[in-house]
Amino acid sequence: MLFLVYCSLIISFLQYDECIEDCDKAVERGRELRADFKMVARALTRKGTALAKLAKNSKDYDIAIETFQKALTEHRNPDTLKRLNEAEKAKKDLEQQEYYDPKLADEEREKGNETFKQQKYPEAIKHYNEAIRRNPKDARVYSNRAACYTKLGAMPEGLKDAEKCIELDPTFTKGYTRKGAVQFFMKEYEKAMETYQAGLKLDPNNQELLDGIRRCVEQINKANRGDISQEDLQEKQSKAMQDPEIQNILTDPIMRQVLMDFQENPRAAQDHLKDPGVAQKIQKLINAGIVQTR
């Protein structure tokens, strides 16, 4: 397999066109001689590497990607798979750069805003999708799309967009109101209140955030008073049991003893509450509906 040695040397000297030609000859000769599949795959991998180095647009990357895929059908080599993934990522990044246009993104965002006002939420999402493709770093679009998803009842998608909004711009308070609203509608009142409080650190007088906290407090107090249906209570408890923080509290040996004392030794339980850390965990369990005070 002299061709393989030669094309490897050519890659080292950045003579990619000649390398591609020699790799093709190596593959052709290898098939004639019924060479080991690994050798043919190696030649195809080197050809793909050279093609990726020469790529200037997405179509060029398509040819490199196709070559790596052919190599993998000959022999599934980890290095080839790694190079394929790198070429696919490079193609995606290049396409994003080619498509990037903040001006068109703003136009699409405005179109989305107009259709949102008309309560045409699916149509608004299409405009926001296009705005994100044109400018994926604009936190405002994720905030607006989160509002659309909330209106449509698609809470997981809305939560994801709200979190992306905060990630892109942690100082943009709208992201916190969006996230808090989604969590509120998901009946995760404690989490929603934490989100609203995080937003208030940036803008202490923000009325949306203040109203959000008020609504959360009302719901938490309502649950603590027992003004909640058994069905809602069970749903709340079920969600709480999926929360890693609640799971950690319930599996903590010290907290298990505290909870046992609440049932069997109320006086000892009161002593436990003098510890701020324990008291805070108990309050979390009460808010989650796991521990009931009535």
Image: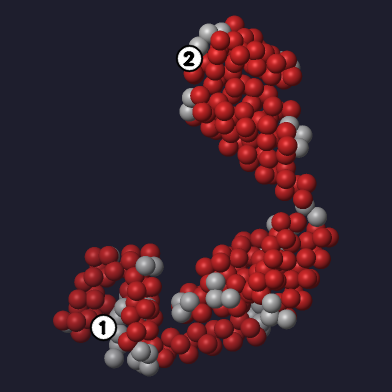
x, y percentage for residue 210?
Answer: 60, 85
For residue 94, above or below residue 241: above
Q: Is residue 192 left or right of residue 14?
A: left
Q: Are marks 2 and 1 in contact (CB under 8 Å)?
A: no
Q: What residue sits 63% from the left and 39% below the top?
A: 88
Frontmost of labels 2 and 1 is: 2
For residue 12, above or below residue 193: above
Question: Which numbered dot is residue 97?
Answer: none
**Secondary-structure class at tag 1:** helix
| Amino acid at circle 2 | Asp
Residue 25, located in which quarter of the rendered image?
top right
x, y percentage for residue 87?
Answer: 64, 35
x, y percentage for residue 168?
Answer: 66, 60
x, y percentage for residue 189?
Answer: 47, 80
Q: Residue furthest front?
A: 32
Residue 114, located in which quarter of the rendered image?
bottom right
| The C terminus: image quadrant | bottom left
Residue 1, located in which quarter of the rendered image?
top right
**Residue underneath mark 2:** 36
Q: What residue sits 55% from the left and 33% below the top?
A: 82
